[in-house]
Amino acid sequence: MKHIFVVNPVSGKGKNAKNYIPTIEKYIKEKGINADIYVTTAQGDGMRYVENVAKNGEPVRFYSCGGDGTLYEIVNGCYKYPNCEVANIPLGSGNDFSRLFGRNTNIDDHINGVPVKLDLIETNGQVAINECAMGVDSEVCAGQADFKKLPMVNGEIAYTLSALNCVIKGKVKNHFKITIDNDKVYEDDFLFCYIGNSRWYGGGYMAAPGAMPNDGLIDCVMVKYPPEIAKKGVFGLVPLLLKYKKGEHLSWEFTKLVHCKHVKIESTNPAAVNVDGECAFVTEREFKLLEGAITFIVPRGSKFLDLI
């Protein structure tokens, strides 16, 4: 099998991934494996490169060397091709998807990892391996990139700053009609709706504490617009945000968790949608589970293997 390390040189504020290249080169030389290194040059370049390689039909494993955005590009480039496998070496500032598997940057543990079939979520021609969402959290995601540019600000801090900024500017309430599995309908004012394949996003916010990316189900978490914010504004959000970060929001009376395979969201006004960190504004979007759609390499020693 061919091994290809796809490196995003701007991940981790332009240091982590770029500085990791000598480690890859040393490993390839010492182990004598059939491997290449590809350094991406712009947004979308990784996706195009991976798909061009995948089309050849030869067995290949792509190692995402960057953050969640790099993983998004690699997955979207190769998920349609059964000859491909994906591994994730977390070198970004958030690394949310890797939290479930352990933030392991040891190359040998990924080379000798365990292949498992994971689900994906398809929406509008894109796929997410980690999560999709609509509402204020997606507004936060859209603004998070600007805060990440600040010195000493990582993904987690940037998400929190962007969340507070959205509250101050009043970008917190959306009127959604949410249809689950073409059957159950929930219509109300919502803070957001999280369509989760895994548990964390936003640099460490545990949106779906029990989600598993190989269980054949979406964890759909719907959070209505809470009275705490309506009455207190930003002062009502802060304690909720802290609990939400820890995954303690499922007990709130204005939170609803359902397990499903299809979610449709219709919005009265254009609302932000987040697909593994890629953001846009829409009035309608559907999300469909693709069960066992990609082969993912779980690094050797990961506690995830004890869960399956």
Image (cartoon, helix red, strand yellow):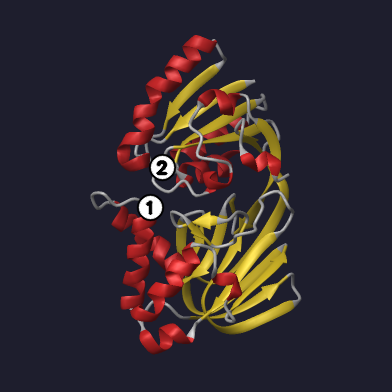
Horizontal side of 260 relative to 4 (left or right) equals right
Identify the disc placed on residue 98: none
Give the amino acid type for the residue marked by disc 1 in the picture.
Answer: Gly
Where 3 sits versus 257, above or below? above
Where 99 sits versus 242, above or below? above
Horizontal side of 40 relative to 151 (left or right) equals right
Q: Position of residue 246 (x, y in %)?
A: 50, 62
User: Which class describes the residues within 10 Å of circle 2: few (<14), some (14-19), or many (20+)?
Assistant: many
Residue 283 visible in the picture: yes
Q: Residue placed at 49% from the left, 61% from the top?
A: 274
Q: Position of residue 178 (x, y in %)?
A: 63, 76
Q: Position of residue 74 (x, y in %)?
A: 54, 39
Which comes before the other along the chain, label 1 or label 2?
2
The quadrant where residue 88 appears: top right
Cα distance, mark 1 to mark 2? Answer: 9 Å
Pointer 1 residue: 155
Pointer 2 residue: 92
Q: Quadrant of the N terminus?
A: top right
Most extreme residue toward the bottom is 231
Q: Answer yes or no: do the residues labelled 1 and 2 have beta carbons within 8 Å?
A: yes
